[in-house]
Amino acid sequence: FGLRRGRRGAELKVMSTVEGKTPLYFTRDVREGDERGEWGTDIYKFRGEELSYALGREGSTKKKLARAADCIMEYVGEFAYISGVKEERRRGMRYLRWLLKQRSGAVRLDELGVSKSYKDIHQVTIPKEAIPEVMGSKGSGLRSI
């Protein structure tokens, strides 16, 4: 029936659709947590308005998070299901938490506990006079990257 990754992505998409039509069908007894195995699914429970912020318009923010983390990310009810190998899940959860921290204001890498050991993050210093051009109108330039 295809590769495990594709099967899990399809399963989560169906779960999300069913949960939208019949709330709590899959999530009645779900708890946040991380799987210990190499392949698996980690779960994050959204609080308050986090879900709509993490979803973005037409799911654009969720898609960007999943693509950046190279994981499978689907929102089922009030939960984010993050699937893949351990490192993919770790990145997906880390990026989701960083995104949600931005809701309360500007976030700096040093405040997030980012260490130089992360191979997926490269800090770029932008000259002050170039910031408006990089950001674009209402941050659209930066979000398009």
Image (cartoon, rainbow, N blue to C red):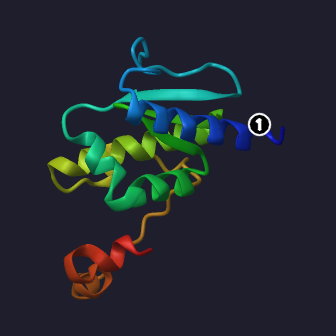
The residue at 34%/46% (across/down) is 98
Q: Residue furthest left?
A: 104
The residue at 37%/60% (across/down) is 58
Q: Nearer the viewer, residue 140 or 118?
A: 140
Q: Is residue 42 above or below residue 125?
A: above
The quadrant the C terminus occupies is bottom left
Percent x, y for residue 33?
Answer: 47, 19
Percent x, y for residue 7?
Answer: 72, 38
- Residue 129 left/right relative to 98: left
On the question of residue 114 being in view, the answer is no
The quadrant the N terminus occupies is top right
- Residue 40 left/right relative to 47: right
- Specify the quadrant of the image occupied by residue 11: top right
Q: Is residue 22 above or below residue 104?
A: above
Q: Residue furthest front?
A: 21
Q: Nearer the viewer, residue 58 or 86?
A: 58
Q: Residue furthest top?
A: 29
Q: Nearer the viewer, residue 4 or 125?
A: 4
Q: Identify the residue under disc 1.
A: 4
The local crowd at label 1, few if under 14, some if 14 to 19, many if 20 or more residues have their Cα within 10 Å, is few
Secondary structure of the residue carrying tag 1 is helix
Q: Nearer the viewer, residue 39 or 91?
A: 39
Question: How many numbered callouts?
Answer: 1
Percent x, y for residue 17?
Answer: 47, 39
The residue at 37%/32% (across/down) is 77
The residue at 46%/46% (across/down) is 115
On the question of residue 97 being in view, the answer is yes
What amino acid is found at the position of numbered circle 1 in the picture? Arg
